[in-house]
Image: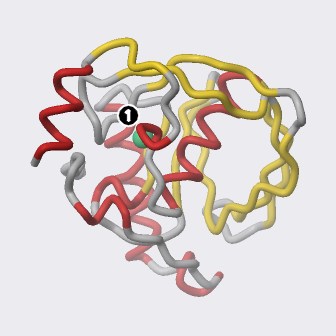
Amino acid sequence: MILPVITYPNKNLRKKSEELSVEKIASPEVQSFITDLIETMLKEDGLGLAAVQVDKHWRIFAVATEDGPMVFINPKISFKSWFKEMDEEGCLSIPGVFGTVKRPKAVIIKSLDRNGEKVSMKATGLFARVIQHEFDHVNGDLFIDKIQTVTRGQEILDEMKAK
Ligand code: NI
């Protein structure tokens, strides 16, 4: 089922999401939500989508990778490289706005997969960027807070901020 994506300045995007127990992750409610979250991300052509963006305040996000969609539950970033990179980002919850954001080039993320199993992985480049962008969503942070230069959609952003 495709879920409606909420957009800025909807205040729910600023809510901090809550951790899920392994029992809760195994529930049909959460399992079907994860399926819907992935389906919605793919349909909307997003590189990633956090639960908060469909107004569900669980610490879950999905990322589209070359090997297929991946799900991160109760994520923690345990390492950030000293070396940072600047690149352009956008967000399904802030349509039409793009800007450059400086982020660590590599991270190690520890989380649970949809089976409740612990997963730890190193990410670099675009994958690391998407993970950090989605991790911010889980904490109620948005990329526009970190933007250095708005590359597209300044007038859209000004209009949204005025709401
Ligand atoms: Ni986003």
Q: Mark 1 points at which residue?
A: 91
Residue 84, percent from left and from top: 78, 27
**Residue pictured at 64% horizontal, 32% vertical:** 129
Considering depth in this image, is 103 or 32 the residue closer to the camera?
A: 103
Residue 43, percent from left and from top: 30, 32
Q: Tell whether 159 sits left or right of 38.
A: left
Q: What element carries label 1?
A: loop
Q: In which quarter of the image is residue 21?
A: bottom right
Task: Say whether mark 1 is within 8 Å of ligand 1.
Answer: yes
Estimate how packed mark 1 is, as few (under 14), some (14 to 19) or many (20 or more) residues with alpha carbons within 10 Å. many
Q: Is residue 2 visible?
A: no
Q: How many labels does the image show?
A: 1
Residue 51, percent from left and from top: 41, 59
Considering depth in this image, is 97 or 162 the residue closer to the camera?
A: 162
Amino acid residing under circle 1: Cys
**Residue pictured at 60% horizontal, 17% vertical:** 87
Q: Quadrant of residue 131?
A: top right
